[in-house]
Amino acid sequence: MPQDAFTLNLIIKELRRKLSGGKISKITQPQKELLSFIVYTENGSVKLEICVSAKSCRINLAETEYPAPKTAPGFCMLLRKHLQNAKITDIGVIGGERIAYFDFDCTSEFELLKMRLYAEIMGKYSNCVLVKDGIILGALKTSAIGESTGRVLFAGAKYALPEAQDKLSQNDRAGIAAALSDCDGDIAKFISERVRGVSYSTALEIAETYGEGITADDIVNYLGGEAYSPCVTFLNGKEKDFKVRSCEREKKPYPTLLQAQTAYYAAINARQAFEEKKKKLLSATNSAVKKLEKRLAVIEQKLFECKDMESVKLKGELITANLYAIKRGQSGFEAVNYYDEKGGTVKIDLDKTLSPADNAQRYYKKYAKLKRTALSVSAQKAEAKEKLDYLNSVISHIYAGECLSDFEETEEELGAIGLIKEQNAKKKTESKTPFRTFEKDGFTIFAGRNNLQNDRLLKRLSPQDIWLHTQKYHSSHVGILTDGKAVPDEVLLAAAEICAYYSDGRDGTKIPVDFVIRKQVKKPPKSNAGFVIYDGYNTMLVNPDAHAELRKD
């Protein structure tokens, strides 16, 4: 949610209790507009984040680790210079403003220095400024004299707060009551526009809490009261917002606002990381697909040019058969086609500068060249189509991905074939992501997340286990662990529906799914990841179903 002054004030109260007296042990700037501080407190280490991005400006505690850049940006180096091992003495907010501050005791070689870090959580104007004795030492976003920001933010200048908004204070009962008497429209809009430090989102909650008979006392008590019930709200099963309190039905309560905020941003960041990784993998794969499609178009054109090679050979043979009747200097002649049962004729062009025998050789050489081309490009076409089918299977698995871990081995797979930068050796040694796992009537069902997992799943199954794959669609490999028992129809149906769901046909109906015992499935040597051949199978038509109620992983 927009961190208005009302919400920020409550967050800072909780941070003060949690971080006061703590020492800064590590400072990083993993992203352009994100600062990360590891604070060592008496209860252990805590990760504090200050984000000044326009879309997600915030001050929060986090558990997510971001890789730090090899070279720290300038502002990060400045913070390390002054705040490394510094003690947090106070945390507070500027009254009615979306500006928090962190006070530090910094020990240098010769003296104890006091510094303040301002975190301005103001949408696109968000910033982080380090100040000593009222003088700016540095800012994450600097502005010079003459810029349209209305403030000067560079080293050596005096720090000045933004110009105060012409709004009513949150505890001005009389002023709010007077203004409220003139309100005859959207009460939430009135509150957000007339009361300082209240976003429209918070104003909506106030309006929904008290209804049409809302009074100035209600507004002041809501904004100044200590009673609140932090929660994360949901929309269609996805995290929508975190709030101090909410009238919405789909929500999850948390003991503290910090915990609600941490859970919300962890989910949002995970979703963002998932979408970014998905976009990266799709971009690399789709780019390779387009190149292959262009290559196939060129190959098809060459094959089209070779389609008349037999007629070229025939003309050479007819010239040879009629050498006695052809004279040097002829531009062409018409010969009887002795391969045509009806006795048809063929018109043959001749090079007047060549002898009849040389003209025949010219056609033979052209035929030989076309034949070599046809053989070569036919092999290239088969290879390109095989690779295209493989890349389309990768795309299918990317679209079926449900979380970031689903892409780990896909990224490794694309790195191995040179489509993206290959993962480092350290990451490759990490434990592999487990299969999607389901339980049905005492039977375990596995579904692969990508081609590498599909190969591993094949090795995991015993000869009499059941293996499933969609027919004429790219899909995950699915296996049923039988333990030597007969598989009930209900279990087989569920496995087939899962297989259809994790396929290109997930949006359709009556998807054909082949099933066969594992020993009938073979992986050809040197074949692409996920490629197999099988026989002796049966097919069933099913509707795709994720069977979330059976999911165990």
Image (tube, rainbow, N blue to C red):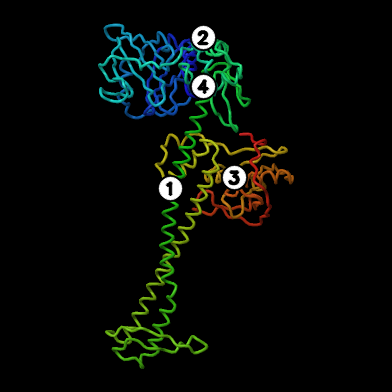
Which is closer to the viewer, label 1 or label 4? 4
The crowding category of the residue bearing disc 2, from other C-alpha atoms within 10 Å (few below 14, some 14 to 19, many at least 20), is some
Q: Residue most toward the bottom? A: 325
Q: Is residue 78 visible?
A: yes
Which is closer to the viewer, label 4 or label 3? 4
Q: Earlier in the sequence, mark 1 or mark 2?
A: 2
Q: Callout 1, which amino acid?
A: Ile
Q: Earlier in the sequence, mark 4 or mark 2?
A: 2
The crowding category of the residue bearing disc 3, from other C-alpha atoms within 10 Å (few below 14, some 14 to 19, many at least 20), is many
Q: Nearer the viewer, residue 418 or 222?
A: 222
Q: CA distance from mark 4 to mark 3?
A: 33 Å
Q: Is residue 500 above or below residue 332?
A: above
Numbered mark located on residue 502 in the image? 3
Instruction: Determine whether the residue tagged by mark 2 lies in a helix, strand or loop.
Output: helix
Q: Callout 2, which amino acid?
A: Arg
Q: Nearer the viewer, residue 196 or 328?
A: 196
Mark 3 in CB contact with mark 2 (< 8 angstroms):
no
Residue 377: x percent and y percent? 42, 65
Q: CA distance from mark 3 to mark 2?
A: 59 Å
Numbered mark located on residue 173 in the image? 2
Q: Earlier in the sequence, mark 1 or mark 3?
A: 1
Q: Nearer the viewer, residue 500 or 91?
A: 91
Q: Earlier in the sequence, mark 1 or mark 4?
A: 4
Numbered mark located on residue 261 in the image? 4
Which is closer to the viewer, label 3 or label 2? 2
Instruction: Determine whether the residue tagged by mark 3 lies in a helix, strand or loop.
Output: loop
Residue at image x 62%, y 27%?
250
Q: Is residue 541 above or below residue 9?
A: below
Q: Is residue 122 above or below residue 219?
A: below
Residue behind mark 1: 417
Q: Is residue 57 left or right of residue 263?
A: left
